[in-house]
Amino acid sequence: MLTAYLDESAHETKDVIVAGFLGNDEQWEECARKWKVGLGKRKYLHVKELRFKRDRDRELLERLGPIPHECGLVPLLATVPVSSYEDLVFKTRAEKMTKGYYLCLVTLFDAIAKNTPEDESVKFVFEVQKEYEIRAKWYFDGNEHRRTSSGDPKFSGIEFIPKDSSILTQPADYLAYFVTQRFRDPESIKAKWCAPIGRNTQPALGIIHDGIGLRDVVERTLKKHPEFAKKIESGNFSV
């Protein structure tokens, strides 16, 4: 079984990012061991709490960034520019179902299903996300038709765990933060200091959605499918 640990960096009227890593138990165990060593005296890495002024913070990010890649974990990344289609769904039933967070999940579910071995099942782990958790599970359930080569569910489970209850959500937090800063200003100190987590040894699964293309998909779907929200809710909205 493979496990994906994911985190989000969201501003629901602009860009929403969901990022993380995918791997098997052996890879995650190696990552946890190396991550603890990289943390030194720290117990956790909360990137947004760093001041980005001290050399020790920069050195910390340099130590931790390469670790997921060294362990063979596959980076996961989906971005959705909500502002590109927000006016199309504003104050409609579709608005709730087209939150950027959900569309990121749909993108990642699809990418993982298409790019992992047919005999592998996948479990998803997030930190507690009260705003999105219930509907995220709906989207997950909408993928029950996906099966492994043996006929078992392709997606074996989705779990929302308390913050800081697992060290394995920290690489996802780091990656999501880096991508956010990269989009905002690639020349900023934050983007440059966080760059080690973005130096992939293999391509990320997912997609960076183009605002124009995504708007076109939403607009065409609204016109073609009056019951758009039900289509989204079923997990069959593919972008």
Image (tube, grey):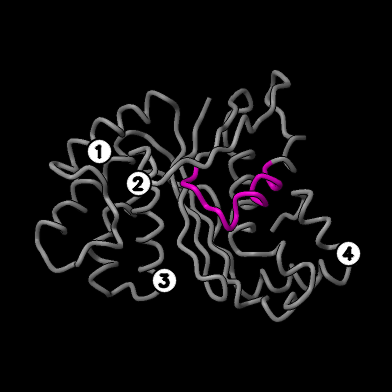
Counting from the top left corner in percent of width and height, residue 212 is at 64, 75
Q: Quadrant of residue 98?
A: bottom right
Crowd tier of the residue under label 1, counting other residues whose Cα lies within 10 Å: few below 14, some 14–19, many 20 or above: many
Q: Which region of the structure is painted magenta?
A: 126-140
- Considering only order in the chain, which callout, 3 or 1, is on the residue closer to the N terminus? 1
> Where does the image place residue 31, in percent across and percent down from the top left?
31, 34
Query: Mark 3 falls on what kind of element?
Result: helix
Is 215 left or right of 171, judged from the image as shown? right
Mark nearer the N terminus (4 vs 2): 2
Whether the residues at callouts 1 and 2 have beta carbons within 8 Å, the answer is yes
Across the whole image, how many numbered discs are drawn on residues?
4
Task: Find the distance from the CA under tag 1 to the CA under tag 4.
Answer: 47 Å
Residue at mark 1: 35
Q: Which residue is mark 2?
A: 171
> Reading the chain from its start, which is encountered first: label 3 or label 2?
2
Number of other residues with Cα within 10 Å of mark 2, as a class: few under 14, some 14 to 19, many 20 or more: many
- Determine the CA span between mark 3 and mark 2: 19 Å
**Residue positioned most to the top:** 150
Q: Residue at horizontal 10%, vertical 56%?
A: 56
Please tell me whether mark 4 sits on a helix, a strand or a loop: loop
Residue at x 56%, y 70% (from the top left corner): 12
Q: Three-letter amino acid code at disc 1?
A: Trp
Q: CA distance from mark 1 to mark 3?
A: 26 Å
Of the numbered discs in the image, which one, if any, rests on residue 225?
4
Residue furthest left as drawn: 55
Local SS, label 2: helix
User: Where's residue 19, x and y in %?
Assistant: 46, 52
Residue of label 3: 183
Which quadrant would the C terminus be assigned to in this image?
bottom right
Residue type, label 4:
His
Residue at 62%, 45% in the rendered image: 109
